[in-house]
Image (tube, helix red, strand yellow):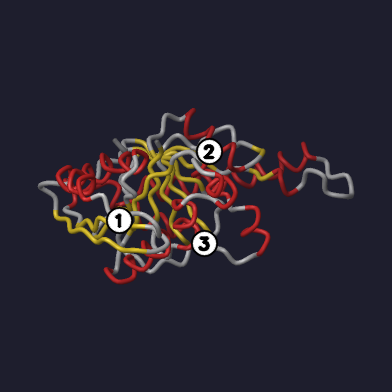
Amino acid sequence: MFERILFATDFSEANLKILDFLPEFREIGTEEVIVVRVINLNRVIGVAGGVNVEEYVEECRREAEIKLSEVVSRVKKLGFRAKPFLPIPAGDPVVEIVKAAKESGSKLILMGSRGRGLLKEILLGSVSEGVVRKSDLPVMVIKHKTHVKRLFDRIVYAHDLREHSEVAMKYIRFIAERVGSEIILVHVVEKGEKLVEEKLKAIEEELGGLNFRTVVRYGTPHKEILKVCEEVDATSVFIGGGHPETVAEKLLGSTADAVLRHSKVPVFVAKS
């Protein structure tokens, strides 16, 4: 299921700490890691002063090839097959990362996020959020300052009882059966709604045979999900991410967007 994954890197020290989690991916069957570095042309297009884009790209590629080789070497030492994604793409990072994942036949995109420090990032969104929205593949985002040591020991599975949440089930079961994960199934009942016990029971039956427990909360979904993460000392959150369905979701983003934005632990978004 995760035989080949795409690791997106900017070569920063914080981003490369993600490599510390790779041995855990070997436990769930990952054999090959494709490493991609995108030259971000959003930073130079339209810049005053007449930047020669072709020269800029060539210079960046020369530097990136050396660093890519170093990262690939580190990944190989961890016991994986590894190779860089070539030629090194240049353009919008979101578009190029999604394209690289598809062209390389990867099953998962693994990437980092710097968090939500700047107003500009909050308004325009980060690269990781953009990749999650545009990718048809599952995406795992690891915040640079996460305290987590392992990803799959204690998984919070956020489920809103809708179909798009169900897509995460196959990944959770696959992982849990291999590494013995503890699963906390979390459902949040929003204001004006009622708990649909029959649907929740059906989901619990699908988790049968795994080590899981259920937590039901009332309130704002992303806030309650993140509260549960802190209470149970979660090591990751798994959540389904579909297309925006309501006007509010289109304007403000979905629960998956909010969880990704504010979570302190790694977030796995499964796409419907």
Residue pictured at 17% horizontal, 42% vertical: 206
148 and 270: which is toward the camera? 270
Q: Residues within 10 Å of mark 3 (few under 14, many from 20)?
A: few
Residue pictured at 36% horizontal, 54% vertical: 193
Q: In screen coordinates, is 66 left or right of 158?
A: right
158 and 125: which is toward the camera? 158
Q: In screen coordinates, is 61 left or right of 263?
A: right
Tag 2 near tag 3, CB within 8 Å: no
Q: Circle 1 is placed at which residue position?
A: 187
Q: Earlier in the sequence, mark 1 or mark 2?
A: 2
Which mark, by number, is residue 13? 3
The relative height of residue 166 versus residue 113 in the rendered view (above or below) is above
**What's the residue type where badge 3 is placed?**
Glu
The relative height of residue 132 versus residue 194 in the rendered view (above or below) is above
Screen quadrant of the N terminus: top left
Which mark, by number, is residue 262? none
**What's the residue type where badge 2 is placed?**
Lys
Q: Circle 2 is placed at which residue position?
A: 134
The image shows residue 173 at horizontal and vertical percentages of: 21, 44
170 and 19: which is toward the camera? 170
Nearer the observer: mark 2 or 3; the answer is 2
The relative height of residue 197 versus residue 122 in the rendered view (above or below) is above
Q: Earlier in the sequence, mark 3 or mark 1?
A: 3
Q: Residues within 10 Å of mark 1 (few under 14, many from 20)?
A: many
Between the C-alphas of marks 3 and 1, the distance is: 36 Å
Between the C-alphas of marks 2 and 3, the distance is: 26 Å
Instruction: Tell me the SS state at disc 2.
Output: helix
